[in-house]
Each structure stands twice: as structure tokens, then as C-alpha cells.
Image (cartoon, rainbow, N blue to C red):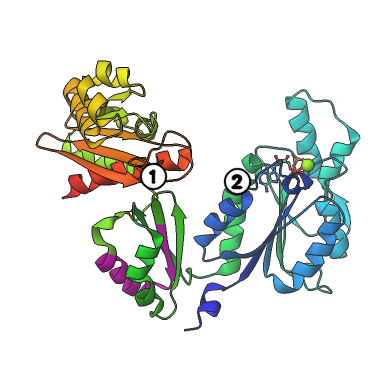
Amino acid sequence: MDVERLLLFMRAVLLNTGTELLAGDVHDTHLAFIAREIFSVGLRIEERRTVGDGPVISKTLRELFPRAEIIFVTGGLGPTSDDITRDVVAALLGLKLQENAELLASLKARLKARRIKWVSSIARQALVPEGVQILPNENGSASGLYLKADINPKIRSPYIFLLPGPPRELQPMFRDSVMSILRSIVKGPPKFERRFYKIAYMGESLIEEAIGKKILAIPGVELGYCARPGEVDVRIIGDRAALDQADRVVRSQLGDSIFTIGDETLEEVLVKLLTAKKQTLAIAESCTGGLLANRITNVAGASAVLLAGYICYANEAKIDMLGVDPKLIKEQGAVSEQVARAMAEGARKRAGSTYAFATTGVAGPSGGSREKPVGTVYVALASEREIKVKKLFFPSDRETFKQLVAQAAFEMLRRKLIS
Ligand code: ATP
Ligand code: MG
């Protein structure tokens, strides 16, 4: 089967307008939101453009119209003089702007309820091109607009959605009004699906080596990777039969390395596993400065498993809080297998938990030595029966270093819990 034809079922294009986006003052969130939403009806964004407010919107739409079947335009629906989206679209399609009495009344009521003075420019928001469908805005004054394809029979045009800029207005409008219209445009069940696999603490090249060729040999499957510190998402897209085949490859090759096939984080998986086993956790952190505890406590229900987190950065803290033997620190150094071991065991005993993590390392940029260069780290996992220590090497910036250490530690425990 032709992959392009399968995946680019209907060409959907996104046009973000707003000079603030190009100035770097605002981060675009619409692409991620819209792309994820429309996937469920079998649509993908094929192209995204970002332009400033002004005549460039008209020029860009003229360029996009011939190659788009569905187009989402965001921003520029407000009352100010730089909000020109609806005027531009009306002009391009040769549609007259008409005052919509209902819209005008609801705008007036909205302002009155908020005790905001009526300014005549606000009435612009009640001017809509003839023949459009109004998409109610529950969270702001700018309504969205939907124009069906070829709304002016004399001019070829795609299905057009004009949507407000603020995410808190766009998102509910999209879910409440846009999705049902899209369903009627697309018709029938989605032609393709998407599956996700998340893998921690395994490089993306290794993953690719394990599955890449075998999956790409299956006709009609698209394969993608998304790598973050200490974690890789594998994403496959295709029709159901092809995906079932690809799924068998991924599972047989990666097996237990997959920590979830859903949206869960690694810490969520850990909390779930520990909760199910009624087991508990303590965390002793030096170089990670509380990141492990922070991530665990971001999970709802963490209190059922986390008993204590100790941040012991200084040697004295390791001695006072965890009972690490000062002689050990003096002889082996704070960054050592023995100290990591003593920290984990100290934390486990003091907290009375089933398991305890300990991290101690050289995050840098200074403080490295020849035997222990910047990036050296020991991660310990104590349980009732044993203490395992791993020596790892993550030479990178401090934040990435901490994330990598956390991933390594969490994956160590996850492996133990599923074994
Ligand atoms: P308003 O009625 O608020 O003027 P509008 O439809 O005219 O809405 P804009 O003026 O273009 O929209 O944008 C309003 C605000 O929405 C921006 O200041 C920005 O904070 C936010 N915004 C716009 N576009 C985006 C985007 N792509 N991603 C995230 N936020 C955005
Ligand atoms: Mg505006």
C-alpha cells in the first residue's frame, strides 16, 4: 500500500497568526493540541505556518488554499485593529461581512455581566462573513467561525476554521464544536491508528537496531522515535492489520524494556507497581537534589508508597541524616560505591521502607578528578535482601545529568519489581 496516500488522507494545514509568536514572546501550543485532537478522527496536520498580524495572512492563505483540504487559522479574531483574520478571509472569498444580531446581543450581555464599558470597536466581533457557522466561545468574546468548502461557489476553498488565539478559549471550542464538524467532513472510521511504546534508559540507536528494519519491512507502517533524557517513545502509525504485525515485532524485540504503552510516566508506573505490592520507598539524594522525590510526589497517590526523602548534599548531612560512617567518606570519597551503598541502607533503615534509592555523583561543571570525572555517578537500590549499586557516567549539563540519574534509578527499581 502507498504509505503517503494512506497517511495523508486529507490534507489539513494549520496557520498560526500573531506577531507575538514570531517575536518569541509566546510559545505556540496550538499545533500540539490540535494535532493530538484530530488524530482520533484520522486526520494529521501536514503543514504548519506561523505569520505575523497583517497583510501577510492574506498572502499566506492564498498560497495554502490550493493545497489544503482543511485549514485551521488561529488568532486575530479579537476587537483590536491588528485582529484582521475574519476581514481577510471574507475578502479572499468574496463574501460580504454582515452584522450578526444574535452575536451582537450576546457580546453586549457578556460585557454587561462583567461590568465592562461598551466600546464601539467591540461590535466588529459581531461582523461575520455571510454563510458561516458560528462556533460559540464559552471563555471569551471572540467567536470561532466555520466556513464549509467552496462556500462561495465561484472560488475554490477548503473547509476553513477560524479559531481564537488564547488556548483557554480555543481548546474547549475545539472539543465542543470543531470535532463534531470534522467527524462529518471525514466520514467513516479512521483509516489509520497510532500506537506508543515508552522505553527508559536505553539509547534510541539501540532501539532502532532492535526494531527498525523489521518494522519498516511491513508495508504501510510509519515508524518514529522521540528521545528525551533517559527515555525514548516509539510511535508507529498505520492501519490496524499492519500495526498488529508491527506490534508483535516491538514486543518480541523490546519486551520488558517497554514500561508503558500508554501516556504514563516512569514514576507513575513505579507508584502503581509499589502500591499493588503494598511496598514502600525511601529516597536519599545527593547529586539529584530532590528530583527523584519530586517526580515521585508528582504522582497522585504517592503517599501510599513514599515514606521519606532525604536531601543530603554535604558530607555532614550524609553522616547525620543517614548514619553514613565518616571514615567511609574520608577513605572512599563521598562519590563512591561504598557511600552510595551506605546512604541507601541508612535511608531504608531510618524510614523503615521496603526499598531505598541513593544517588551520589559529580554533576559538574567543576569538581571532577581523573578517577571520577564530571558525570560520574553511583546509583544504589537497597531492598530487604541486597543492595545493588551501579556506577554510571553521564557527562552533560546539570539538569540533564539529574534527569538521566533519575531515569536510571527508576528503571532499576522497575526491573526489580517486575522480575
Ligand atoms: P483576543 O480576543 O484575545 O484578541 P484573538 O483571537 O484575537 O483573541 P490573538 O490576539 O491573536 O487572538 O491572541 C491572543 C493571545 O492568545 C495571545 O496574546 C497569546 O497569549 C495567545 N495565543 C495566540 N496564539 C497562540 C498560540 N499559537 N499558542 C499559544 N498561545 C497563543
Ligand atoms: Mg487579539
Residue 237, magenta (yes or no): yes
Which quarter of the figure has residue 345? top left
Q: Position of residue 196 (x, y in %)?
A: 39, 59
Q: Which residues are magenta?
A: 233-253
Q: At numbered mark 2, what does the secondary structure look like: helix, strand or loop?
A: helix
Question: Can you identify the residue that label 1 sits on?
Answer: 404
Residue occupying the far bottom of the picture:
1
Position above or below: 21 against 9: above
Question: Can you identify the residue that label 2 sits on?
Answer: 171
Rendering quadrant holding ligand 1:
top right
* 323, 71: nearer the viewer: 323
In this rendering, position of residue 395 left or right of residue 127 = left
Residue name at image x 20 percent, y 24 percent: 346
> How far is disc 2 from disc 1 in space, using C-alphas?
33 Å
Query: Given the image, on which type of amino acid does mark 1 rest?
Result: Leu
Among numbered discs 2 and 1, the one appearing first in the sequence: 2
Position above or below: 88 against 306: below
Q: Position of residue 337 (x, y in %)?
A: 23, 37
Residue 54, magenta (yes or no): no
Query: Given the image, on which type of amino acid does mark 2 rest?
Result: Gln
Residue name at image x 67 percent, y 70 percent: 69
Q: Position of residue 371 (x, y in %)?
A: 32, 41
